[in-house]
Image (cartoon, grey):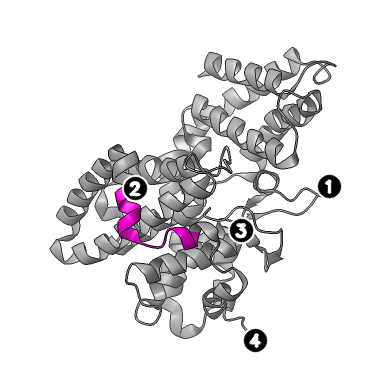
Amino acid sequence: MAVDLAAALFELDRDFPADATELRLGDAGEAAARVRERRADLAAIMQEVRQGYLSAFGPAAEPRFEQVRGALALGFVRMAMRHGHWGNDLHEYHNEEHVLELLIGRLAKVRLELGWSVLAAEDWLLLALFATCHDLRQREAAEFWHEVGANERASVAESFRILDAVGFSRDTDRDFYVALGLMIAGSTFDARPVAPNPFNTAEVASSGGSLAPKLARDLDQWLGAHEEASRERARRLMLIAADLDTANVGEPFVSLAGSAVRLVKEREKRAGRALYATESAQPVFDFLTQGQERYFFELHRFVSPIGEQVFGGGKRVNEPKVHWQSARMRELFPGGPKPGQNGQHVIDAFLRLAHEAG
Protein backbone atom coordinates (compact mmCIF):
# COMPACT_ATOMS: atom_id res chain seq x y z
CA MET A 1 0.00 0.00 0.00
CA ALA A 2 1.42 3.36 -1.01
CA VAL A 3 2.24 5.86 1.68
CA ASP A 4 0.28 9.10 1.22
CA LEU A 5 3.25 11.43 1.32
CA ALA A 6 1.16 14.47 0.46
CA ALA A 7 -1.04 13.92 3.49
CA ALA A 8 2.06 13.34 5.64
CA LEU A 9 3.50 16.70 4.59
CA PHE A 10 0.39 18.50 5.80
CA GLU A 11 0.62 16.75 9.17
CA LEU A 12 4.11 18.01 9.97
CA ASP A 13 2.69 20.97 11.92
CA ARG A 14 1.98 18.53 14.74
CA ASP A 15 5.61 17.48 15.11
CA PHE A 16 7.26 20.80 14.27
CA PRO A 17 5.29 23.73 15.69
CA ALA A 18 6.32 27.37 15.44
CA ASP A 19 9.43 28.34 17.39
CA ALA A 20 10.22 31.66 19.05
CA THR A 21 11.48 33.27 15.83
CA GLU A 22 8.37 32.33 13.91
CA LEU A 23 6.12 33.57 16.69
CA ARG A 24 8.04 36.84 16.86
CA LEU A 25 7.70 37.56 13.12
CA GLY A 26 4.44 36.42 11.57
CA ASP A 27 3.52 39.31 9.29
CA ALA A 28 4.82 39.52 5.74
CA GLY A 29 4.43 43.28 5.67
CA GLU A 30 6.65 43.68 8.70
CA ALA A 31 9.22 41.35 7.14
CA ALA A 32 9.22 43.35 3.89
CA ALA A 33 9.73 46.55 5.88
CA ARG A 34 12.76 45.03 7.60
CA VAL A 35 14.23 44.03 4.24
CA ARG A 36 13.76 47.56 2.91
CA GLU A 37 15.37 48.98 6.03
CA ARG A 38 18.36 46.66 6.30
CA ARG A 39 18.82 45.33 2.74
CA ALA A 40 17.56 47.97 0.34
CA ASP A 41 19.63 46.30 -2.37
CA LEU A 42 17.46 43.19 -2.17
CA ALA A 43 14.26 45.20 -2.35
CA ALA A 44 15.55 46.84 -5.54
CA ILE A 45 16.51 43.48 -7.05
CA MET A 46 13.08 42.06 -6.28
CA GLN A 47 11.41 45.01 -7.98
CA GLU A 48 13.53 44.43 -11.09
CA VAL A 49 12.68 40.74 -11.07
CA ARG A 50 9.00 41.59 -10.70
CA GLN A 51 9.09 43.72 -13.84
CA GLY A 52 10.74 40.96 -15.83
CA TYR A 53 8.37 38.33 -14.49
CA LEU A 54 5.26 40.31 -15.39
CA SER A 55 6.66 41.14 -18.82
CA ALA A 56 7.16 37.43 -19.43
CA PHE A 57 3.90 36.10 -17.96
CA GLY A 58 1.49 39.02 -18.11
CA PRO A 59 -0.48 41.04 -15.59
CA ALA A 60 -2.60 38.03 -14.61
CA ALA A 61 0.49 36.61 -12.88
CA GLU A 62 0.83 39.62 -10.57
CA PRO A 63 -1.39 38.52 -7.64
CA ARG A 64 0.48 35.24 -7.21
CA PHE A 65 3.83 36.97 -7.54
CA GLU A 66 2.92 39.43 -4.80
CA GLN A 67 1.85 36.62 -2.49
CA VAL A 68 5.15 34.86 -3.05
CA ARG A 69 7.11 38.08 -2.60
CA GLY A 70 5.61 38.36 0.88
CA ALA A 71 6.52 34.74 1.60
CA LEU A 72 10.10 35.33 0.46
CA ALA A 73 10.41 38.29 2.81
CA LEU A 74 9.14 36.23 5.74
CA GLY A 75 11.48 33.34 4.99
CA PHE A 76 14.52 35.54 4.43
CA VAL A 77 14.10 37.63 7.57
CA ARG A 78 13.39 34.60 9.75
CA MET A 79 16.52 32.93 8.42
CA ALA A 80 18.55 36.06 9.15
CA MET A 81 17.12 36.25 12.67
CA ARG A 82 17.33 32.56 13.50
CA HIS A 83 20.66 31.41 12.05
CA GLY A 84 22.03 34.47 10.30
CA HIS A 85 23.60 37.84 10.85
CA TRP A 86 20.52 39.43 12.45
CA GLY A 87 20.43 37.06 15.41
CA ASN A 88 22.64 35.37 18.00
CA ASP A 89 22.96 31.81 16.63
CA LEU A 90 25.04 32.38 13.51
CA HIS A 91 25.54 29.35 11.30
CA GLU A 92 28.47 30.05 9.00
CA TYR A 93 26.89 28.23 6.05
CA HIS A 94 23.16 27.83 6.67
CA ASN A 95 22.21 31.48 6.99
CA GLU A 96 20.51 34.17 4.91
CA GLU A 97 23.54 34.49 2.63
CA HIS A 98 23.01 30.90 1.50
CA VAL A 99 19.44 31.90 0.62
CA LEU A 100 20.83 34.66 -1.59
CA GLU A 101 23.35 32.30 -3.21
CA LEU A 102 20.40 30.38 -4.57
CA LEU A 103 17.82 33.12 -5.00
CA ILE A 104 19.77 35.94 -6.65
CA GLY A 105 22.77 33.86 -7.66
CA ARG A 106 22.05 30.43 -9.09
CA LEU A 107 18.36 30.82 -9.90
CA ALA A 108 19.09 34.16 -11.54
CA LYS A 109 21.84 32.50 -13.58
CA VAL A 110 19.30 30.00 -14.91
CA ARG A 111 16.99 32.85 -15.88
CA LEU A 112 19.72 34.91 -17.52
CA GLU A 113 21.16 32.01 -19.50
CA LEU A 114 17.97 30.20 -20.52
CA GLY A 115 15.27 32.88 -20.29
CA TRP A 116 11.95 33.04 -18.49
CA SER A 117 10.34 30.65 -20.98
CA VAL A 118 12.38 27.66 -19.82
CA LEU A 119 9.99 27.25 -16.85
CA ALA A 120 6.31 27.88 -16.22
CA ALA A 121 5.32 30.96 -14.22
CA GLU A 122 4.56 29.09 -10.99
CA ASP A 123 7.65 26.92 -11.35
CA TRP A 124 9.81 30.04 -10.98
CA LEU A 125 7.88 30.98 -7.85
CA LEU A 126 8.27 27.52 -6.36
CA LEU A 127 12.01 27.50 -6.98
CA ALA A 128 12.32 30.94 -5.37
CA LEU A 129 10.42 29.66 -2.34
CA PHE A 130 12.65 26.60 -2.20
CA ALA A 131 15.75 28.80 -2.25
CA THR A 132 14.41 30.82 0.66
CA CYS A 133 12.76 28.15 2.80
CA HIS A 134 14.63 24.87 2.39
CA ASP A 135 17.01 25.49 5.32
CA LEU A 136 14.71 27.48 7.63
CA ARG A 137 15.23 25.13 10.57
CA GLN A 138 18.66 23.79 11.51
CA ARG A 139 18.45 22.84 15.19
CA GLU A 140 16.11 19.83 15.14
CA ALA A 141 17.15 16.59 16.83
CA ALA A 142 18.52 14.20 14.23
CA GLU A 143 15.80 11.84 13.07
CA PHE A 144 15.05 10.48 9.61
CA TRP A 145 11.63 9.49 8.27
CA HIS A 146 11.83 7.57 5.00
CA GLU A 147 15.26 9.23 4.68
CA VAL A 148 13.83 12.76 4.95
CA GLY A 149 15.70 14.63 7.68
CA ALA A 150 14.19 16.35 10.69
CA ASN A 151 15.52 19.77 9.70
CA GLU A 152 13.91 19.38 6.30
CA ARG A 153 10.58 18.24 7.74
CA ALA A 154 10.58 21.18 10.14
CA SER A 155 11.36 23.52 7.24
CA VAL A 156 8.46 22.06 5.27
CA ALA A 157 6.10 22.67 8.18
CA GLU A 158 7.21 26.27 8.55
CA SER A 159 7.15 26.94 4.82
CA PHE A 160 3.55 25.71 4.70
CA ARG A 161 2.64 28.11 7.50
CA ILE A 162 4.37 30.90 5.58
CA LEU A 163 2.18 30.12 2.56
CA ASP A 164 -0.86 30.19 4.85
CA ALA A 165 0.20 33.60 6.17
CA VAL A 166 0.36 35.21 2.72
CA GLY A 167 -3.01 33.94 1.55
CA PHE A 168 -2.46 30.52 -0.01
CA SER A 169 -5.06 27.85 0.70
CA ARG A 170 -4.19 24.28 1.66
CA ASP A 171 -7.32 23.16 -0.18
CA THR A 172 -7.35 25.11 -3.43
CA ASP A 173 -3.54 25.41 -3.68
CA ARG A 174 -2.81 21.88 -2.47
CA ASP A 175 -0.55 20.97 -5.42
CA PHE A 176 1.54 24.09 -4.85
CA TYR A 177 2.14 23.14 -1.21
CA VAL A 178 2.95 19.54 -2.11
CA ALA A 179 5.47 20.54 -4.79
CA LEU A 180 7.28 22.87 -2.39
CA GLY A 181 7.23 20.28 0.39
CA LEU A 182 8.71 17.61 -1.86
CA MET A 183 11.44 19.96 -3.07
CA ILE A 184 12.48 20.71 0.50
CA ALA A 185 12.27 17.04 1.51
CA GLY A 186 14.45 16.14 -1.47
CA SER A 187 17.17 18.54 -0.30
CA THR A 188 17.98 16.06 2.50
CA PHE A 189 21.38 14.47 2.05
CA ASP A 190 21.03 10.70 2.06
CA ALA A 191 23.59 10.10 4.78
CA ARG A 192 24.18 7.35 7.25
CA PRO A 193 26.27 7.70 10.41
CA VAL A 194 29.86 6.61 10.10
CA ALA A 195 30.95 7.64 13.60
CA PRO A 196 29.43 7.50 17.09
CA ASN A 197 27.65 10.87 16.95
CA PRO A 198 28.03 12.61 13.60
CA PHE A 199 24.63 14.27 13.49
CA ASN A 200 24.96 17.94 12.93
CA THR A 201 24.00 19.89 9.85
CA ALA A 202 27.42 20.06 8.28
CA GLU A 203 28.30 16.42 8.99
CA VAL A 204 25.14 15.21 7.31
CA ALA A 205 25.55 17.58 4.38
CA SER A 206 29.04 16.30 3.72
CA SER A 207 28.31 12.59 4.11
CA GLY A 208 25.93 11.72 1.30
CA GLY A 209 24.19 12.75 -1.86
CA SER A 210 20.92 14.59 -2.28
CA LEU A 211 17.81 12.53 -1.59
CA ALA A 212 15.92 14.19 -4.47
CA PRO A 213 16.74 11.65 -7.22
CA LYS A 214 15.72 8.69 -5.09
CA LEU A 215 12.58 10.41 -3.84
CA ALA A 216 11.71 11.41 -7.39
CA ARG A 217 12.00 7.78 -8.51
CA ASP A 218 9.74 6.68 -5.66
CA LEU A 219 6.98 9.23 -6.21
CA ASP A 220 4.79 6.66 -7.97
CA GLN A 221 4.60 4.82 -4.64
CA TRP A 222 4.08 7.99 -2.60
CA LEU A 223 1.44 9.84 -4.58
CA GLY A 224 -1.79 8.40 -5.96
CA ALA A 225 -2.57 7.81 -9.63
CA HIS A 226 -4.97 10.76 -9.59
CA GLU A 227 -1.99 13.04 -8.91
CA GLU A 228 -0.05 12.18 -12.08
CA ALA A 229 0.31 15.76 -13.34
CA SER A 230 1.33 17.01 -9.90
CA ARG A 231 3.75 14.14 -9.54
CA GLU A 232 5.55 14.92 -12.80
CA ARG A 233 5.78 18.61 -11.97
CA ALA A 234 7.10 17.88 -8.48
CA ARG A 235 9.59 15.36 -9.84
CA ARG A 236 11.01 17.88 -12.31
CA LEU A 237 11.22 20.67 -9.75
CA MET A 238 12.77 18.45 -7.08
CA LEU A 239 15.67 17.66 -9.38
CA ILE A 240 16.20 21.28 -10.42
CA ALA A 241 16.07 22.36 -6.78
CA ALA A 242 18.65 19.75 -5.80
CA ASP A 243 20.97 21.05 -8.50
CA LEU A 244 20.53 24.65 -7.36
CA ASP A 245 21.38 23.66 -3.80
CA THR A 246 24.61 21.90 -4.77
CA ALA A 247 25.70 24.02 -7.75
CA ASN A 248 28.64 25.41 -5.78
CA VAL A 249 30.65 22.73 -7.60
CA GLY A 250 30.13 24.68 -10.83
CA GLU A 251 30.83 28.16 -9.51
CA PRO A 252 34.17 30.01 -9.74
CA PHE A 253 36.76 28.04 -7.82
CA VAL A 254 37.29 30.65 -5.12
CA SER A 255 33.54 30.58 -4.44
CA LEU A 256 33.57 26.78 -4.25
CA ALA A 257 36.44 26.90 -1.77
CA GLY A 258 34.71 29.60 0.22
CA SER A 259 31.58 27.49 0.59
CA ALA A 260 33.68 24.59 1.86
CA VAL A 261 35.29 26.86 4.44
CA ARG A 262 31.93 28.18 5.63
CA LEU A 263 30.63 24.65 5.96
CA VAL A 264 33.63 23.41 7.91
CA LYS A 265 33.45 26.44 10.22
CA GLU A 266 29.82 25.62 10.91
CA ARG A 267 30.68 21.99 11.54
CA GLU A 268 33.44 22.85 13.98
CA LYS A 269 31.19 25.27 15.86
CA ARG A 270 28.44 22.67 16.09
CA ALA A 271 31.00 20.12 17.29
CA GLY A 272 32.23 22.52 20.00
CA ARG A 273 35.74 22.86 18.59
CA ALA A 274 37.28 26.33 18.33
CA LEU A 275 39.17 26.99 15.10
CA TYR A 276 42.16 28.32 17.04
CA ALA A 277 42.32 25.16 19.15
CA THR A 278 44.75 22.47 18.09
CA GLU A 279 42.03 19.83 18.31
CA SER A 280 40.35 21.36 15.26
CA ALA A 281 43.35 21.00 12.96
CA GLN A 282 42.91 17.37 11.90
CA PRO A 283 39.11 17.41 11.35
CA VAL A 284 39.37 20.64 9.35
CA PHE A 285 42.20 19.18 7.28
CA ASP A 286 40.24 15.99 6.63
CA PHE A 287 37.15 17.94 5.60
CA LEU A 288 39.05 20.22 3.23
CA THR A 289 40.98 17.41 1.53
CA GLN A 290 39.33 14.01 1.28
CA GLY A 291 36.00 15.49 2.33
CA GLN A 292 36.06 17.94 -0.56
CA GLU A 293 37.25 15.28 -2.98
CA ARG A 294 34.52 12.87 -1.92
CA TYR A 295 31.80 15.49 -2.20
CA PHE A 296 32.99 16.77 -5.57
CA PHE A 297 33.90 13.52 -7.32
CA GLU A 298 31.84 10.80 -5.63
CA LEU A 299 28.70 12.27 -4.10
CA HIS A 300 27.74 15.15 -6.34
CA ARG A 301 26.06 14.81 -9.71
CA PHE A 302 23.74 17.08 -11.60
CA VAL A 303 20.36 15.40 -11.84
CA SER A 304 18.36 17.77 -14.06
CA PRO A 305 18.98 18.88 -17.64
CA ILE A 306 18.81 22.52 -16.52
CA GLY A 307 21.38 21.97 -13.78
CA GLU A 308 23.80 20.27 -16.14
CA GLN A 309 23.30 22.86 -18.88
CA VAL A 310 23.83 25.89 -16.65
CA PHE A 311 26.38 24.63 -14.11
CA GLY A 312 27.97 21.49 -15.60
CA GLY A 313 30.63 23.34 -17.58
CA GLY A 314 31.79 25.14 -14.46
CA LYS A 315 32.18 21.86 -12.62
CA ARG A 316 34.33 20.44 -15.40
CA VAL A 317 36.57 23.51 -15.19
CA ASN A 318 36.93 22.97 -11.43
CA GLU A 319 37.81 19.26 -11.59
CA PRO A 320 41.60 19.63 -12.06
CA LYS A 321 41.66 22.50 -9.56
CA VAL A 322 40.14 20.33 -6.82
CA HIS A 323 42.75 17.64 -7.53
CA TRP A 324 45.56 20.20 -7.52
CA GLN A 325 44.43 21.92 -4.33
CA SER A 326 44.11 18.66 -2.40
CA ALA A 327 47.55 17.53 -3.56
CA ARG A 328 49.09 20.84 -2.52
CA MET A 329 47.37 20.69 0.87
CA ARG A 330 48.93 17.30 1.48
CA GLU A 331 52.31 18.70 0.50
CA LEU A 332 51.92 21.61 2.91
CA PHE A 333 50.72 19.33 5.71
CA PRO A 334 52.59 16.04 5.13
CA GLY A 335 50.97 13.37 7.25
CA GLY A 336 48.42 15.93 8.44
CA PRO A 337 48.70 19.01 10.66
CA LYS A 338 51.58 19.08 13.11
CA PRO A 339 51.36 19.69 16.88
CA GLY A 340 50.69 23.34 17.54
CA GLN A 341 48.80 23.90 14.32
CA ASN A 342 45.06 24.53 14.41
CA GLY A 343 42.05 24.60 12.13
CA GLN A 344 42.55 28.24 11.20
CA HIS A 345 46.06 27.46 9.95
CA VAL A 346 44.55 24.84 7.65
CA ILE A 347 41.80 27.17 6.44
CA ASP A 348 44.28 29.95 5.69
CA ALA A 349 46.37 27.60 3.56
CA PHE A 350 43.30 26.24 1.78
CA LEU A 351 42.06 29.71 0.83
CA ARG A 352 45.53 30.82 -0.26
CA LEU A 353 45.71 27.89 -2.63
CA ALA A 354 42.19 28.56 -3.92
CA HIS A 355 43.24 32.05 -4.96
CA GLU A 356 46.33 30.63 -6.68
CA ALA A 357 44.21 28.13 -8.61
CA GLY A 358 41.28 30.46 -9.26
Give the number of the mark in front: 1 or 2: 2
Give the image quarter of residue 176.
Answer: bottom left
Query: Is residue 273 visible in the rendered structure shown here?
Result: yes
Give the image quarter of residue 320.
Answer: top right
Against 4, is 193 above or below? above
Give the number of the mark in front: 1 or 3: 3
Q: Position of residue 299 (x, y in %)?
A: 65, 45
* Magenta residue check for 108: no
| Residue at the spot of label 4 | 1
Front one among 109 and 28: 28
* Magenta residue check for 24: yes
Q: Locate residue 187 relative to residue 328 in the image: left or right.
A: left
Query: Is residue 42 visible in the rendered structure shown here?
Result: no
| Residue at the spot of label 1 | 195
Against 79, is 278 above or below? above
Q: Earlier in the sequence, mark 2 or mark 4?
A: 4
Name which residue type carries label 4: Met
1 and 2 marks in contact (CB < 8 Å): no
| Residue at the spot of label 2 | 34
Disc 1 to disc 4, C-alpha distance:
35 Å
Q: Earlier in the sequence, mark 1 or mark 4?
A: 4
Q: Earlier in the sequence, mark 1 or mark 2?
A: 2
Tell me the magenta residue range.
22-34
Q: Earlier in the sequence, mark 3 or mark 4?
A: 4
Disc 3 to disc 4, C-alpha distance:
27 Å
Disc 1 to disc 3, C-alpha distance:
20 Å
Q: Which mark is residue 105?
A: none
